[in-house]
Amino acid sequence: DVGVTHDAYRGKFLAQLSSVRRGTVLQKLARNVCAKQNPAAAVADPIPGLCVNGSRRSPGQAEFDWMMDGRRVECKSAQLCWYPLGNTWIVQFRNIKLPLP
């Protein structure tokens, strides 16, 4: 039910942002928290790499969000939505890319 979900998020800072901007804000927050929780770790920007057609990726199109001690880190978020048929809240993820087999 859009009304219940909308009412729960009404007036909240993140709810007022576009999904792209909200993702950017949450990604920066997650990276900062990750770095503070792991002060000895080497946290670095991703290497954008190449697209399938061989052209260079822009930094915003990298295959992952940052590196920590040589490991790729991808930040994901979800939204809580009211599910009236179950009379409960559910977590909704979108545009998740699973690794190739």
Image: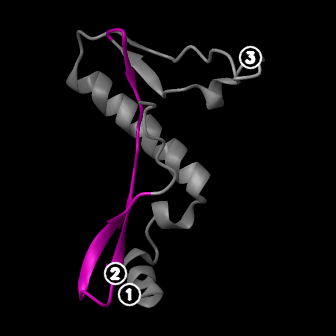
Residue on which the image places disc 3 = 56
Indicate the position of residue 11 as horizontal and vertical percent values: 46, 74
Q: CA distance from mark 2 to mark 3?
A: 41 Å
Element type where label 3 sits in the image: loop
How far, Cα to Cα, is label 3 from label 1?
A: 43 Å
Where residue 1 sits in the image (x, y, percent)?
42, 88
User: Looking at the image, do the residues carrying marks 2 and 1 touch, with CB atoms under 8 Å apart?
Assistant: yes
What residue did someone put label 1 on?
Answer: 4
Please state the extent of the stretch shown in magenta in the rendering.
69-93
Q: Earlier in the sequence, mark 2 or mark 1?
A: 1
Q: Quadrant of residue 8?
A: bottom left
Residue pictured at 75% horizontal, 15% vertical: 54
Q: Secondary structure at mark 1?
A: helix
**Marks 3 and 1, the one that precedes in the sequence:** 1
| Between 32 and 72, the one nearer to me in the picture | 72
Q: Residues within 10 Å of mark 2 (few under 14, many from 20)?
A: many
Q: Position of residue 87 (x, y in %)?
A: 24, 88
Which numbered disc, 3 or 1, marks the residue closer to the eye? 3
Residue 80 picture location, percent across and down: 34, 68
Amino acid type of disc 1? Val
Q: Which residue is mark 2?
A: 82
